Image: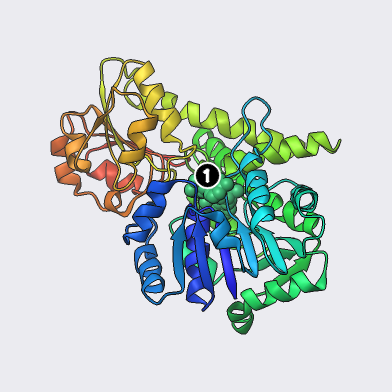
Amino acid sequence: MKVAMIGAGYVGLVSGACFADFGHEVVCVDTVATKIDALNKGEIPIYEPGLDVLVNGNRFAGRLSFTTDIAEAVKGADAVFIAVGTPTRRGDGHADLTYVYAAAEDIAKAMTGYTVIVTKSTVPVGTADEVEAIIRGLRPDGDFSVASNPEFLREGAAIDDFKRPDRVVVGAEDERAREVMRALYRPLFLNETPIVFTTRRTSELIKYAANAFLATKITFINEIADICEKTGANVQDVARGIGLDGRIGKKFLHAGPGYGGSCFPKDTIALVRTAQQFGAPTRIVETVVEVNRQRKLHMVDKVAAACGGSVDGKTIAVLGLTFKPETDDMRDAPSLDIVPGLIARGAAVRAHDPQGMKEAKHLLPEAVTYCDGPYDAMTGADAVVIVTEWNAYRALDLTRTRQALKAAVMIDLRNVYDPAEMARQGFSYVSIGRK
Ligand SMILES: NC(=O)c1ccc[n+]([C@@H]2O[C@H](COP(=O)([O-])OP(=O)(O)OC[C@H]3O[C@@H](n4cnc5c(N)ncnc54)[C@H](O)[C@@H]3O)[C@@H](O)[C@H]2O)c1
């Protein structure tokens, strides 16, 4: 099948490359010319493990190409995916649909023959209806359907998630659209991946409900971690003790500095706004949003407490800036609250991240010193804070760490190390929900 993918970001590029790998003929479109130029030269503009091999393999095989010309990509396509960003709209917290609607207009002008327009971006309930109205307005005689197909991939494991998903969700109102979606995902049917066919509105809500649930699960264990700290219990054992219950499940029960990333923060806020708009407020998700916001800020207090009550005049090594390992994505990362918070309280920050430093330089205060590696960052520092659990920080040489630091103080916001071992090694060690 011929596929056009509008938006060559984390979702569009991975989805486009994976559809090409399934054997479809895919053209990825982006408005950012430097991104498309890079892709046409075989360079991958984001960090996602395995994506370079997948993109270039399919490019050389002639199944995957890149352009800034949306009309060229859409002409003759059987399916056009909209995978553009839907960030938080300034001022009111709703999802900003400007890019989605702009793409819909461009598609309307260029489509030929029967075309299924698919919203892959995370969009509020009713957006597919609006996309249909926009296209119908511009092309009253157009032969097309609009479907919803939310994406559930996780950055850092995106290719595997796309090719071996827990499920595929498709919202469509007519059989013709469902047929095209079935054909696109046929390789997954063969693997017996569950495919949930439903209405567009339900499909749109499934995505928000999934993200809000996961954000709630994380926030729940984070609050349990706070109770552990006050009572002397161990949050990792609590997580294991409850996670082994099949009704609860082990995943998303890792206590930490608060969730971040390109999805949970904006999607929880957008769901809160949608719920309010429709007169069905979700007080659970409202609370999750607020608890998580405060938690990230509270991490600065935690670091200060571990440094004897204040970080003023101290040098703090920060390991990990991205919102999670194996990505260069800095969107809503906890480091964006923690690092400025430390600097505001008088600390000097020496930071390292294996992939995120380039982007971090645009987002963090200029005062941050970026370092070549973890030991460089820790040299002469009064304490080290692990903010993101990159593999490079999971097995630090503790002797070298102690020698690099001015004081052997570690604040481990990801529970990477064992408290008893750290005490044996002579560290003053603070983690989340464990003594
Ligand atoms: N990143 C994730 O892990 C993830 C997972 C699931 C769902 N999503 C959702 O997928 C959507 C895209 O997210 P992302 O992380 O890939 O965003 P992104 O910002 O990485 O990519 C969006 C791309 O769309 C391009 N674009 C914007 N308007 C365009 C237009 N009119 N024509 C062509 N290109 C255009 C931008 O230049 C950008 O490259 C969002 O709705 C997001 O919520 C993201």
On the picture, is 236 further left or further right than 429?
right
In x, y percent, where is residue 382? 23, 27
Q: Quadrant of the N terminus?
A: bottom right
Hey, which quadrant is residue 269 in on the image? top right
The reply to whether residue 422 is in sight is: yes
Hey, which quadrant is residue 181 in on the image? bottom right
In x, y percent, where is residue 391? 31, 54
Q: Image point 42% across, 75% down: which residue?
A: 62
Q: Image point 76% across, 64% down: which residue?
A: 144
On the picture, is 46 further left or further right than 144?
left
In x, y percent, where is residue 296? 49, 31
In x, y percent, where is residue 99? 61, 43
Front residue of this view, candidates 260 and 233:
260
Hey, which quadrant is residue 299 in on the image? top left
The reply to whether residue 309 is in sight is: no
Colour setup of the view:
rainbow
Q: Image point 38% across, 44% down: which residue?
A: 388
Front residue of this view, candidates 196 and 41:
41
Q: Image point 43% across, 31% down: which residue?
A: 336
Task: Indicate the amino acid at tag 1.
Answer: Ser
* Residue receiving disc 1: 262
Front residue of this view, candidates 434 and 147:
147
Compared to residue 250, the image places residue 59 above or below, namely: below
Q: Residues within 10 Å of mark 1 (few under 14, many from 20)?
A: some
Compared to residue 71, the image places residue 23 above or below, namely: below
The total number of labels drawn is: 1
Front residue of this view, candidates 341 and 92:
92
Q: Secondary structure at mark 1?
A: loop
On the picture, is 48 further left or further right than 226?
left
Residue located farthest toward the bottom when viewing the structure as drawn: 190
Task: Confirm or reject: label 1 Cβ below 8 Å from ligand 1.
Answer: yes
